[in-house]
Each structure stands twice: as structure tokens, then as C-alpha cells.
Amino acid sequence: MVPVGGAAGLTFSHGMDVLRSMPNQSLEDAAQTGLHFAGRLLLATAGALALLAAIDAPYQKWNWLRKLKMTRH
């Protein structure tokens, strides 16, 4: 889960200026900014999860096939 936390942390650190400027915006602009930031956060964490799945799925299949083999005993 470190990559997901890292992706979320990087998104937060790059978006802190935008989040700090929200109280000075109108309600409509602040809502739009918040939704845009939430979308970027969602995409960053989903991308990290997709990367983890792309790495883990072939390993799990290889490990399953390896355990499925019969031994000489």
C-alpha cells in the first residue's frame, strides 16, 4: 500500500497551494476546484493500484501454476 499512499501524498503536496486558495474563491469556483482536486487524487490512487495489479497478477498466476505441479513423491 506504500505506492498508493505515495501517490496520494504527492498529489496532496502538489495541490496544497490550490487547496489553500479555496477559502478566497467564490462558492462555485471553490466547488469546482475541490472536485477537480478530488478527481486528480482519485486518478493518482487508481493509477497506483493499477500498477500494483499489473505487477501482482502475473506473479500470482506464476505462483499458482508453480504450486499446481506434482512432485515425485
Image (tube, helix red, strand yellow):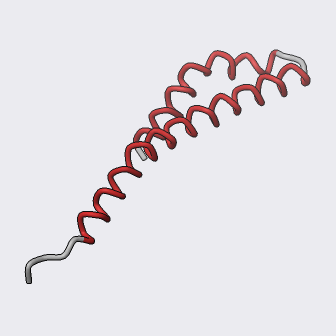
Give the vertical position of 60 relative to 29 (above or below). below
Which residue is at the front of the view, 36 or 31? Answer: 36
The location of residue 29, given as percent across then percent down, is 86, 19
The location of residue 46, given as percent across then percent down, is 57, 39
Give the vertical position of 33 relative to 73 (above or below). above
Q: Residue furthest bottom?
A: 73
Relative horizontal placement of residue 47, taking residue 59 as reference (left or right): right
Image quarter where the C terminus lies is bottom left
Q: Quadrant of residue 42?
A: top right
The location of residue 63, given as percent across then percent down, is 28, 60
Please give the name of the residue rendered at 38% of the width and 43% of the height, measured from the top-left corner.
55
Give the vertical position of 17 relative to 7 (above or below). above
Which residue is at the front of the view, 40 or 12? Answer: 40
Which residue is at the front of the view, 12 or 41? Answer: 41
Relative horizontal placement of residue 36, taking residue 13 as reference (left or right): right
The location of residue 58, given as percent across then percent down, is 37, 50
Q: Which residue lies furthest to the left in this view?
A: 72
Which residue is at the front of the view, 52 or 34? Answer: 52
